[in-house]
Amino acid sequence: MGYRELLKNYIRFLELHAGDNFIESVPDAPETVLTERDLGELRAIAAEIFREARGEPPRTPVANYNYRFRLLLNHYGIAIRTAAAIAETSEETVRCWRTQPRSRRYRAMSQEAFESFEERLADFLETGQLTEGTGHKARTAAGRNRQAESSVPSRRGAAANRTS
């Protein structure tokens, strides 16, 4: 196998597992090690993959949220403490999400937790600040509070029903 085929396989792997080949993210990276010529070659390989894939049934991306989580942390250089704050969870949970599946500490990240993290990460990257109470835990708690409010009679209602 030549290097071109190896690169094509790796690009396919990234697209399948991470949902992106990150070629267009390279120019925005703080430290680019690829020249414009390198990027042009990678774009040509990605275009070749796209042309070869025409007519084939579409591939279903792998729903491995832990892997995608690790990619985001590595790509943006996010520390465990910051990731825990963004995800509204403990540092230990973040460590369990980051570890390899073969580890006894591994814990699968749910789709809901990943989507909430991704949403809050976008806000964090845009503003540089953590927004309070917007993650999935806050939405779940708000839903529980609404249910509790509707099932518990108000004090005014209870007092009105009391006989003197």
Image (tube, rainbow, N blue to C red):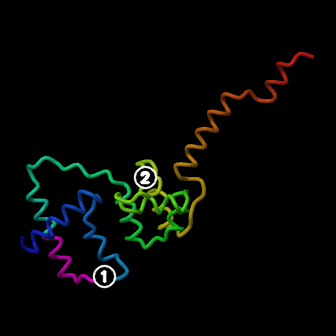
Q: Which residue is mark 2?
A: 115
Q: Position of residue 72 (x, y in %)?
A: 39, 65
Secondary element under disc 1, as helix, strand or loop, is loop
Instruction: Give the CA separation, mark 1 to mark 2.
Output: 28 Å
What residue sits right under mark 1 in the picture? 32
**Which quadrant of the structure image shows residue 129?**
bottom right
Q: Looking at the picture, how far across and down is residue 23, in whole percent?
A: 25, 70
Quadrant in which the N terminus is drawn: bottom left
Question: Who is closer to the viewer here, 120 or 98?
Answer: 98
Q: Amino acid at mark 1?
A: Thr
- Position of residue 60 measured from the top left corner of the image (x, y, whole percent): 23, 48
Q: Is residue 102 left or right of residue 41?
A: right
Q: Is residue 154 magenta?
A: no
* Label 1 neighbour load within 10 Å: few <14, some 14-19, many 20+: few
Disc nearer the start of the sequence (1/2): 1
Q: Position of residue 24 (x, y in %)?
A: 27, 70
* Quadrant showing the C terminus: top right
Which residue extends farthest top? 163
Span of residues in magenta: 33-44
The residue at 58%/39% (across/down) is 143
Secondary structure of the residue carrying tag 2 is: helix
Q: Nearer the viewer, residue 107 or 37?
A: 107
Q: Residue at x 35, y 77 (%)?
A: 29
- The residue lying furthest to the front in this view is 104
Left or right placement of residue 47 versus residue 161 in this view = left
Q: Looking at the image, which is closer to me, 146 or 84? A: 84
User: In percent of the image, x 46 and y 70: which residue is there?
Assistant: 78
Q: Is residue 39 magenta?
A: yes
